[in-house]
Image (cartoon, grey):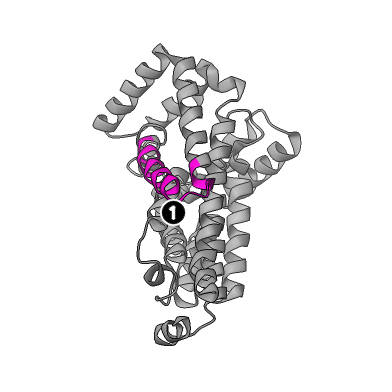
Amino acid sequence: MQSTMRTDLTPRRVLLYGLGSLWLLDGILQMQPGMFTMDMVSTIMQPAASGEPHWLTALIDWSIHLTTSHLVLFNWLVVAVQILIGVMLLMPRRRLVTWGLWLSIAWGLAVWLFGEGLGQLLTGTATFLTGAPGSVLLYVAAAALLLSEDRTSWWRGRRVDAATWIVALTLLLGGLLQFSPVYWTGLGLASPFGSGAMMPQPLFIRQSLGFMATLVGESPIAANAVSIVIALGLGIALLAWPRSRAVRWATLAWLALTWWFGQDLGMLFSGMATDPNSAPVLALLLWAGGQAHRTDPGRPPAAQSARSR
C-alpha cells in the first residue's frame, strides 16, 4: 500500500503544491501599490484588448469600465480570490482541495478571457516568447489534470504522462505561432524584448533585454527560424522520448532563456507583475511529469498493477 500511494501521489503533490504556491504568489503580487491605481488598467487590462475581434474587445472594455468604477474594491477581490485558491490547494483536506481546483478553473478562465484576452491568440501577434497561450490557461490545465479521477491512466498508464503532454503541446503551439509574418521582421521580433527593456526595473535586466532586442532585430529571419526549430524540436522530442533527462533538461534551459529574455522574468521586478508568466508553470508541469517517470521506471502497466496488488 505504501508503494502504491507513493507512486500515485508523488507527482500530484508536486503539481498541487506548486499550483497552490503560484496562486498565493499571484495574490501577493496583486497587493502591489500600482495595482490599486489606474496604472493597473492602462498597463495590464487595456493592452489585452488591442487587436482583438470586436466581440472580445467589447467584453474587455466592459470589464475595464466595471473595474475603474470600483478599482480598489475590485483589486482586493482579486487578491482575496487568488489567496483563497492558494490556501485551499495547500490544505490537507481533500474536499477543500477539490473545491479549490474547481475554483482555480473557473477563476482562471475568467482571468484568461478578461485579463489576458484569450492569450492574444486571436490577434495574429501572439507569441510564446511573451507567454502565449497564457500562464493562467496553464493553471487551468494543471487544475483539470489534478481533478482527474483515473490517476493511473494519467500518471503511469500512458507512455507520455499528461503533464508532459501539456508542455509538449504548448511548445508545439509556440513554434507554430512564430510563423506569423510579423515575427520575420526586425521590428516585430525585437518588440517582445524591447518592451521589457523600457520597463522600470533593475538596470542589468533592462540592459540584457535591450541587448537581445538589438541582436534579433539585426537578423530577424535567422533568429526566428532558430526559435521555431527549438520550440518544435523540443515539443516533438518530449513526445518521442518522454523519459529522456537530456530532453527535459534542454526544455528547462529553453524555458529559462524564454522566461528571462522574452517574458522579462514575469516582470517581477517592475512593480506591475500579476504572475510569473508561463515559463515557470511549464517548468512545474515538466517537473511533475519527470516525477511520474521516476516513480515508474519503465515498467508496463500490467506489471505495475501486479506489483501494487
**Residue 212's x, y, as percent?**
64, 47
- Write down the region rendered in magenta: 88-110
- Above or below residue 37? Residue 299 is below
**Residue 2's x, y, as percent?**
54, 73
- Above or below residue 16? Residue 79 is above
The reply to whether residue 7 is in sight is yes
Q: Which residue is mark 1?
A: 142
Tag 1: residue type? Ala
- Residue 104 sits inside the magenta stretch: yes
**Residue 31's x, y, as percent?**
58, 25
Badge 1 marks a residue whose secondary structure is: helix
Quadrant containing the C terminus is bottom left
Give the residue drawn at x 36%, y 60%.
148
Give the residue drawn at x 42%, y 77%.
159
Farthest left residue?
55
Give the residue drawn at x 41%, y 32%.
115
- Residue 231 sits inside the magenta stretch: no
